[in-house]
Amino acid sequence: MWVQSNFFIRDCNGDFELLRTWRTDSSSPQYTVISVIVDPLQDLVVTVSEKRSPFVSQVDAEQDHSIFLVEFRLASSGLPHLDSACTSLECRHVFHEPGRHSSQLLDQPAICGDRVVVLYCTDSDSTWELFIQVIDWRKGRAKSYPLHHSRSRVCRSIFHLVDEHTIVVVDGGGHLSLYTLRALDGSPQYRVTYLLPGLQCFDFPPEYLIHATPSFHGAAARPDLMPGYVPSPESQIMVLDILSDTWDVILVIDMTIFSQEVIHSETPVTVPWSDWGPKYTCCFPYYSQYKISVFGSKIACALPWDRARQPRETPEELSDLELYDGHDHFYVHIWDFNERVISRAENARDRSPPHPLICKPGRRAMSWFVEDIVSHRAYTAT
């Protein structure tokens, strides 16, 4: 948690004495800490610091420059991580042409096993490019790679690291792209792009936020924190908040769209929304009061509604209720998009509570979308 510009980590065993604090000041005067990420399973804290001045003036071609600094420490003590070959690592980028250049980190970096992935963009004479730095934190190595992208609103891109070998990138132009990372060096291979539904925005392009199952890969220093069951990527969902100046929605995406056939495809393709959206997504209205957590095929959603959901009342209908005013409690709703769970619920003879309610979002004709949002996906709500 963050308190007064400090970052605190507390041990999960409830011992309040086991509390670690990090100043968000960088160890180098040339850098500013902009991100702190924690992998409790590996007892790992990674801090990412950006250059105080993001601009460089380059006279010759093919020159590399330091763009950010990464540090690896033990979450339990704050000391340098014993499994890392170095405490800090300078990540560099090669600018190919002379001129004035800058770099900007995008989204929160991600840890999965031995890899840390950082998404960033560069601006060279008003030409924006998208890159990732793939870092092996144990060996103390880092390398930059360009990503295939639409060149549209690059600086609004976000990503999700599914596992050590799979990454999903959403750019500001509404392109959801899948890459695989080679095992040897982490270099990305572009596989497929799924087009998101078009939004009619007035002043600003939409922003995106991803909710997904946490990564449980890598050697666990804290095996007691490992869940008893880790769902496979193809049985998971990914939730995408789409925030715009016209309307905000939540898009639930079935990750079977990233099947093994797609992952190993040698011919990248672009899939229009009408060919995949109705079958593999559900769309809900978004409200700022939502608190969402995702694990496997389930969403846990905390809502401060003034009453609990009634039988046959869908989450969309519940979203139109007035908020509870003056009280500090909330309701947690569990939505499960697992087809096997839905099938069991449909075939169950006992329909008495707490039997899960089967729902379908159906058609959402919204004037702010270029096309209607139609879903044929069912889910259970409890």
Image: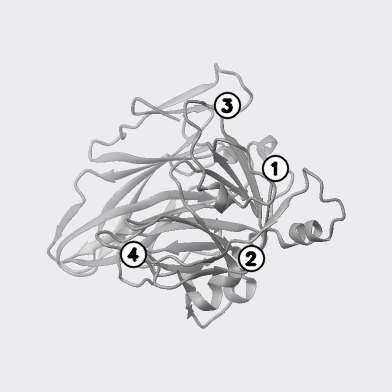
Mark sitting earlier along the chain (4/3): 3
C-alpha span from label 4 to label 1: 35 Å
C-alpha span from label 2 to label 4: 33 Å
Q: Name the residue carrying label 4.
A: 130
Q: Nearer the viewer, mark 2 or mark 1?
A: 2
Residue 14 is situated, as x and y percent measured from the top left of the image, at: 62, 21
| Badge number at residue 227 | 1
Q: In the picture, residue 170 is in which quadrant?
A: bottom left
Query: Visible in this render: residue 113?
Result: no
Relative placement, left or right, of 374 versus 157 is right
C-alpha span from label 4 to label 3: 37 Å
CB of mark 4 within 8 Å of CB of mark 1? no
Mark sitting earlier along the chain (4/1): 4
Q: Nearer the viewer, residue 320 or 198?
A: 320
Query: Visible in this render: residue 95?
Result: yes
The image shows residue 291, relative to residue 252, as above or below, that is: above
Mark sitting earlier along the chain (2/4): 4
User: Which amino acid is tagged 2?
Assistant: Arg
